[in-house]
Each structure stands twice: as C-alpha cells, then as structure tokens.
C-alpha cells in the first residue's frame, strides 16, 4: 500500500540535486504559499519557475488556488525557493509525500521554512482578514498514528523521536509581532494554535465547538505535517494563517465556508501577507 512506502534519503537527494542543477542561486529560505496566497512570490526578483510536473518524483498540485510550481529567486537580499501550491492529505497523497518538499528543501541546504495557509477562525475574537501567527498546532490527523515520520527512520533526515516543543520558532514570532507594529497592523496580527483536520469537507459546527474547547484558534487542512517534518530535519519555522472565514460555533449563526471565498480573501489580503513575509525575510537577512 502506498501509504506505508518510505521515501528514501536517496530519492529526496535526487530531487534536491535535480532542482539545484537547474537554478542559479542556492536558496536559504523555503516558502509554502497557502490557498489564494500564491502571489506572495510576486516580490521575488530574478525569478526562475519550475513546474512540479517537470521535477521527477515530485507530486503535482490538484487544488484551485495552488499553481503547482516552484519560484526561485531573490527576496530582500536572500535566495529563496517558494512553493506556489502545497500538497494536502485529502488530495490522496500519503503524508510523507505531502511533506516531501520540506525534506527536499533541507537537503538543498535551506535553513528556514516560512509556511502560510488559509484557515477558519475558531477564536470568536478573530475577524476575516486577520493574520494568526502560529505558535503551536494540534495535529488531529496525527492522533490516529498517521504521521509523515511513520516507517523506518533515516537518521540522516532527523531523529526517530523528535520533540515538537518550539517547532514554531519563538524568536521569529516575537519578531513578527514587532514587524506588525512597524506595519501599523498590531490589531490584525494574533498569535494562536492551528488545528490540522484531514478535510476536504469543511469543519462542522459541532467540530468547531469541540476545537474551541480544546484551545484551537484556527482550523485548516494543511501545515502541521509540513512542520512536523521541518522540525524533524531541523529547519527553523515561521508560520501564519490568514483567517478567511469565521467558523460557526452556533447553530443560530450558520456559516457556509466555500473555497472561492477562501481564495478571494487570500487575494484581498495578499499585499499585507506579502509585506509581512518580506519584512520577516529582511530581518533574517540582517541577522
Ligand atoms: C480549503 O478552502 C482549502 O484552504 C486551505 C485548506 O487547507 C484547504 O486546502 O488551504 P491551505 O491550507 O493550503 O492554505
Ligand atoms: N477551513 C476554513 N480552510 C479550512 O480548512 N474554514 C477555511 C480554510
């Protein structure tokens, strides 16, 4: 069964070498663009694009709002590799394949991973368009033992039992809060807990009520498996969710989430998200 198949270090390295042989810079920052947030890459200069379908062994994107290509170039003085399109479990890929690009980034020599996503706001104080810096996650899909780390461990990629404490780099969160002040948007930027559900159906009202009780602030169908792999292989992670709708906690106030709206909110907030990302990269460049 494909779920149980391990992706070997050699396979990861072959993909990393293939990409490196085709690009002019050696990226130090990896970026994963969430639904509707593909235009985060527009600030990248001297950009080279590589379609996922042209990378042997790479999965391909199947979700609208995820273009399915790498954009490699310079951002705020640093070489970056951005994924316009990520892989979700509901697309049919096993988690190890969904998060394969993160391992490829590591083997390419990347040190930082910047992750974005579109998410439903569970925290009742959140508004559509808010940006939640992710401090921690609840990996609901992982509760059943479904992990991208399942199977034999290759120590070249990371330890068998990685801790998840500080998987979301606390110093980068602190810095992002300063950046939000500089940008004049401290009220828009929150800090919270993201919950990964398998999807592709949106969360039910009862699920939202439960997640709220469990301390979840935003809910989506991605990110946690990528961050588990990033922490396993030692990448420094900064992640944020764009709140694209308010998840209903009340049968009297029903909400009907839909992907067109998710992508539209992403589009309407693209310049703010891009500026936050650019300023974070600038601060890393200044380190
Ligand atoms: C649902 O509208 C889609 O938006 C989010 C959910 O995970 C789901 O894929 O996308 P990203 O997490 O990729 O931003
Ligand atoms: N859920 C949601 N993604 C989700 O999974 N409400 C918005 C975006």
Image (cartoon, rainbow, N blue to C red):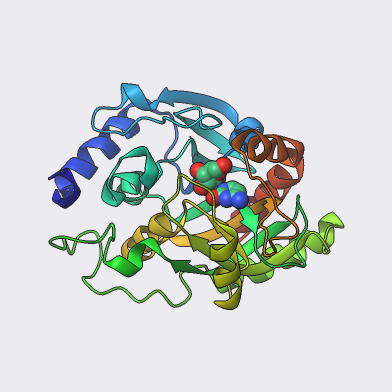
Looking at the image, which is closer to me, 213 or 6?
213
Residue 239 position by quadrant = bottom right
Does the image show residue 201?
A: yes
Residue 286 position by quadrant = bottom right
Q: Residue furthest right?
A: 184
Q: Which residue is depicted at the point 44% across and 59% down?
A: 224
- Relative image position of residue 161 (x, y in whole percent): 25, 74
Q: Residue furthest front?
A: 252
Left or right side of 182 for 274: left
Residue 184 position by quadrant = bottom right
Q: Is residue 72 above or below residue 237?
A: above
On the rendered image, what quadrant is the C terminus found in? bottom right
Q: How many dots with numbers?
A: 0
Does the image show residue 33?
A: no
Q: Is residue 53 above or below residue 270?
A: above
Q: Which residue is depicted at the point 24% across and 27% down?
A: 56
Left or right side of 104 for 286: right
- Relative image position of residue 176 (x, y in whole percent): 69, 63
Looking at the image, which is closer to me, 208 or 50?
208
- Relative image position of residue 219 (x, y in whole percent): 56, 58
On the rendered image, what quadrant is the N terminus found in? top left
Q: Which residue is depicted at the point 20% across and 60% down?
A: 156
Left or right side of 42 for 152: left
- Relative image position of residue 117 (x, y in whole percent): 57, 49
Q: Which residue is depicted at the point 66% across and 45% down?
A: 256
């Amino acid at each position: 069964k494909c779920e149980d198949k391990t992706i070997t270090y050699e396979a990861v390295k072959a993909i990393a070498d293939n990409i490196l042989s085709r690009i002019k810079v050696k990226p130090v920052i990896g970026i994963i663009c969430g639904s509707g947030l593909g235009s985060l890459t527009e600030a990248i200069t001297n950009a080279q694009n590589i379609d996922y379908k042209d990378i042997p062994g790479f999965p391909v994107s199947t979700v609208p709002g995820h273009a399915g290509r790498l954009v490699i170039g310079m951002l705020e003085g640093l070489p970056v590799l951005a994924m316009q399109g990520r892989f979700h479990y509901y697309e049919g890929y096993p988690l190890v394949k969904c998060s394969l690009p993160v391992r490829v980034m590591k083997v390419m020599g990347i040190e930082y991973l910047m992750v974005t996503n579109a998410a439903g706001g569970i925290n009742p104080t959140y508004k559509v368009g808010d940006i939640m810096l992710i401090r921690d996650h609840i990996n609901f899909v992982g509760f059943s033992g479904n992990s991208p780390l399942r199977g034999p461990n290759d120590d070249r990629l990371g330890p068998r039992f990685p801790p998840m404490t500080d998987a979301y780099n606390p110093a980068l969160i602190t810095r992002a809060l300063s950046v939000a002040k500089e940008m004049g948007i401290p009220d828009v930027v929150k800090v919270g807990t993201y919950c990964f559900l398998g999807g592709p159906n949106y969360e039910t009202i009862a699920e939202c009520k439960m997640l709220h009780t469990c301390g979840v602030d935003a809910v989506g169908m991605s990110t946690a498996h990528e961050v588990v792999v990033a922490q396993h292989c030692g990448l420094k992670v900064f992640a944020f969710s764009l709140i694209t709708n308010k998840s209903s906690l009340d049968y009297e106030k029903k909400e009907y989430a839909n992907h067109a709206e998710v992508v539209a909110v992403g589009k309407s907030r693209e310049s703010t998200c891009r500026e936050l990302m650019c300023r974070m990269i600038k601060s890393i460049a200044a380190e």
